[in-house]
Image (tube, rainbow, N blue to C red):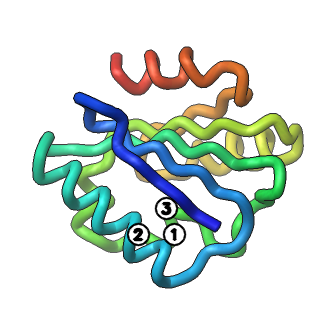
Amino acid sequence: MLSWTTLPDSDIVSVVYNGGLTPAEIDGLRTELASTVAAHGAAKLLVEIGKDGGMPSKSLIDELSGEELLRKLGRSAVLTDKSLLRMMIAAGAKMAPIEVRVFKVAERDEAVAWLRA
């Protein structure tokens, strides 16, 4: 399950992943990102992987890769308390086309501050 919202007065799209990705959810997220880009010229992602979420078979970046929209994304912060996911995401971030940083769920405010900087 994937849910999202744009943080008030910002270019940050907050996404919560709790297992499974459907084409309709990916399309809805694309629409939200496109709307944020239209309003602000760019968008940043704050992705929280919930306690029921593991690593999706395809990452959000993979789902958006090759699209014009991906070039409009700035930083991305990922929130998770799962050690293995933190290590996997941190390693994969080195190859991502955008800047990605991993935070613990309790560090949400720090992640938002980093995205706003």
Marks 1,2: beta carbons within 8 A? yes
Residue at the spot 62% in from the left edge and 74% down from the top edge: 21
Residue at the spot 51% in from the left edge and 50% down from the top edge: 15
- Residue beneath disc 2: 65
Q: Position of residue 111 (x, y in %)?
A: 54, 23
What's under tag 1, amino acid-wise?
A: Asp
Residue at the spot 38% in from the left edge and 70% down from the top edge: 28
Q: Secondary structure at mark 3?
A: helix
Q: Depth check: 29 or 58 in front?
A: 29
What's under tag 3, amino acid-wise?
A: Ile
Marks 1,3: beta carbons within 8 A? yes
Q: Depth check: 84 or 80 in front?
A: 80
Q: Secondary structure at mark 2?
A: loop
Q: Depth check: 76 or 92 in front?
A: 76
Residue at the spot 50% in from the left edge and 84% down from the top edge: 23
Q: State the separation of the CA atoms marked 1 and 3.
A: 4 Å
Say the numbered circle drawn on residue 62. 1
Neighbour class for label 3 at 10 Å: few (<14), some, many (≥20)?
Answer: few
Neighbour class for label 2 at 10 Å: few (<14), some, many (≥20)?
Answer: few
Say the numbered circle drawn on residue 35. none
Q: State the separation of the CA atoms marked 3 and 2.
A: 6 Å
Marks 3,2: beta carbons within 8 A? yes
What's under tag 2, amino acid-wise?
A: Ser
Quarter of the image with the C terminus is top left
Q: Position of residue 57 (x, y in %)?
A: 71, 74
Q: Position of residue 55 (x, y in %)?
A: 75, 61
Quarter of the image with the N terminus is bottom right
- Residue beneath disc 3: 61
Q: State the separation of the CA atoms marked 1 and 2.
A: 5 Å
Pick out the residue farthest to the bottom: 23
Q: Secondary structure at mark 1?
A: helix
Q: Position of residue 112 (x, y in %)?
A: 47, 23
